[in-house]
């Protein structure tokens, strides 16, 4: 399943995901940091290819369907991160468990 950056439903969820307050009225920062670490670990496993036309393709093999294309490597990395965020938030919203990326991720 591909989740593109402009997937409207995921963009709405991204804006509201951490809006639910904790007992002290502040957003759940622990969840935010866990997701930030998860994204960092996933991005560290990204694979990039230079295409025949000079553009770049990026993918994260452990996250099926997370793929991005761009004219530069930097832009491809940015697009891939955005796609990963949307994929992750949509999966969580649908009740899917986080995939294990490595032991550090699962022990937190």
Image: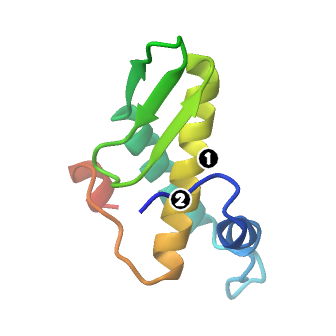
Query: According to the image, label 1 marks what residue?
Result: 82
- Where is residue 69? Give x, y as percent: 55, 33
Report which quarter residue 72 is drawn in: top right
- Residue 11 to residue 101: above or below: below
Q: Is residue 16 left or right of residue 62?
A: right
- Where is residue 83? Give x, y as percent: 56, 50
The quarter of the image holding the C terminus is: bottom left
- Residue 12 to residue 84: above or below: below
Circles 1 and 2, Cβ within 8 Å, touching? The answer is no
The residue sitting at 63% across, 20% down in the picture is: 71
Query: According to the image, label 2 marks what residue?
Result: 3
Nearest to the observer: residue 39 or residue 2 = 2
- Residue 42 to residue 48: above or below: below
- Binning the other alpha carbons within 10 Å of mark 1 as few (below 14), some (14 to 19) or many (20 upward) gives many
The colour scheme used to paint the residues is rainbow
Sequence-wise first label, 1 or 2:
2
Q: Is residue 87 left or right of residue 107?
A: right
Label 2: state its secondary structure. Answer: loop
The residue sitting at 44% across, 32% down in the picture is: 58
Nearest to the observer: residue 20 or residue 69 = 69
The residue sitting at 59% across, 61% down in the picture is: 32
Question: Which residue is most to the front?
Answer: 53
The quarter of the image holding the N terminus is: bottom left
């Amino acid at each position: 399943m591909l989740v593109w950056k402009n997937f409207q439903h995921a963009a709405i969820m991204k804006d509201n995901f951490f809006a639910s307050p904790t007992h002290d009225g502040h957003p759940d920062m622990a969840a935010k940091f866990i997701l930030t670490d998860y994204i960092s670990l996933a991005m560290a496993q990204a694979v990039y290819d230079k295409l025949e036309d000079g553009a770049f393709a990026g993918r994260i093999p452990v996250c099926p369907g997370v793929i991005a294309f761009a004219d530069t490597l930097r832009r491809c990395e940015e697009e891939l991160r955005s796609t990963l965020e949307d994929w992750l938030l949509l999966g969580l919203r649908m009740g899917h468990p986080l995939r294990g990326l490595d032991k550090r991720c699962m022990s937190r």
